[in-house]
Structures are given as C-alpha cells and as structure tokens.
Amino acid sequence: MSQDRNRWRVRWALFILSSFLGGFVMTHLLAGDAAIFPASNGQRPQATVEKAGPVRMTEGTEVEYRVTYGKCGHLETDVAPVPTRVMVGLTLEDFTRLFPDWQVESFTAQRVVLKRRVESLCPNDGANRLITIRNGRVVVFYGTGKKPDSPLMLETAVDARKLSPQDRERLEAGVVVSSDQEVLDWLEGIAE
C-alpha cells in the first residue's frame, strides 16, 4: 500500500513541476518576455529580458470599433474601455491573425482603433422605417429619419394633396414603424 501511495506522490509532484514549467514557457518564452540562450561553454544558461518588445494590449487598453455599413453608408463607432479577456496580451501580429475581419487603423498599448465594412444596413436603418412626404409624394426611408442620408426604400404614387388632413399632418412630421408589414398597413390605410 505504501509503495502505491509513494508512486502517486511522485507522479503528482512531477505533474505539478511540469505544469509550472509549462506555464513558465507559455507566459515567458512564447510571450516574448524573456529569451533563454543555451551557453556554449557548458555553464548554466543565462536569462535576458527584452526591454523593447512588441506592443501588447493590456487590461487598460481602450478599443475603438468603427463599422461602416455598405447598404446605407453610415459609420457606427463604439469605444470599449476594456478589451475582452482574449485580447489582453495580443500583439498587432497576433490580433490580425486571430481577427482577420477587422482592419487595424492604429495599435498602441493605450488605444487600438479597428475598422471594418459590413454589407448590410446599420442597426437603426435595418430595424426601422420612416414614412413621410417628400416632393408631394408619400415615401418610405430606411431608419428613423435621424440621419439625413438614410436610403430611400420606396417612393409611392400616393399624392400628399389627396390625403386626409390628419394623415397628411402625421406624415409631414414623419411616422416611424418597425417592420415592412407596418409600412404596408400604413400605406393601405392612407390609400383608402
């Protein structure tokens, strides 16, 4: 019994030691924080620490995301004060390899600016529709009308002069709906 217990202790100690050494290699050697050079004269190897290594993201790095939406042309910007845990420690090279969909505009330890183009509507334009009057006709735009350059979805043949005063007043102010079905319901309602 005691031999089995001793074998278990030896195996456990070897496991702990190999885990520590493996962790050291992963955090220091592969991360570029230290380089170990074997001595050619039979002496103990010396460890040297790189003073000027590659720039790395830290827990304090701000990450700015810039997304351009191709179908409406809008630019959405978001700043995250703390990168995700997977980003901490990444270099520019690591980042471009792991996140190929993003272009890196700038990369410092204080701030990383990322950009990408998405061929869709921005969240505002994709989720909402604005029904209004333009040039005497009822028109529908993607979005809520908060952005003056939202793309036109539909220009109807409905003449604004033929609308009831209440409908005309509401449409001149702009009616925001959240689906294409609501657009159709509105258009049917004012056409009657």
Image (cartoon, grey):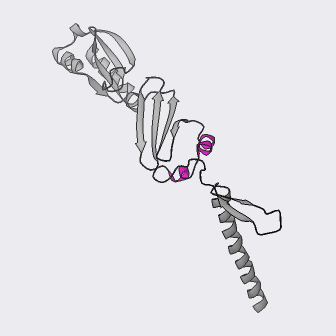
Q: Nearer the viewer, residue 138 or 77?
A: 77
Instruction: Residue at 69% x, 63% y: name it.
Output: 47
Tell me if 13 is positioned left or right of 33 in this view.
right
- Identify the residue at the far left of this view: 165
Instruction: Residue at 51% x, 26% y: name it.
Output: 119
Instruction: Residue at 34% x, 23% y: name it.
Output: 183
Q: Is residue 184 magenta?
A: no
Q: Quadrant of the C terminus?
A: top left
The x and y percentages for residue 73 are 44, 23
Instruction: Residue at 34% x, 11% y: name it.
Output: 156
Q: Which corner quadrant of the image does residue 157 belong to?
A: top left
- Identify the residue at the far bottom of this view: 2
- Identify the residue at the far front of this view: 41
Q: Can residue 61 be spotted in the picture?
A: yes
Q: Nearer the viewer, residue 123 or 153?
A: 123
The x and y percentages for residue 175 are 26, 24
Tell me if 159 is positioned left or right of 118 in this view.
left
Q: Which residues are magenta?
A: 82-101
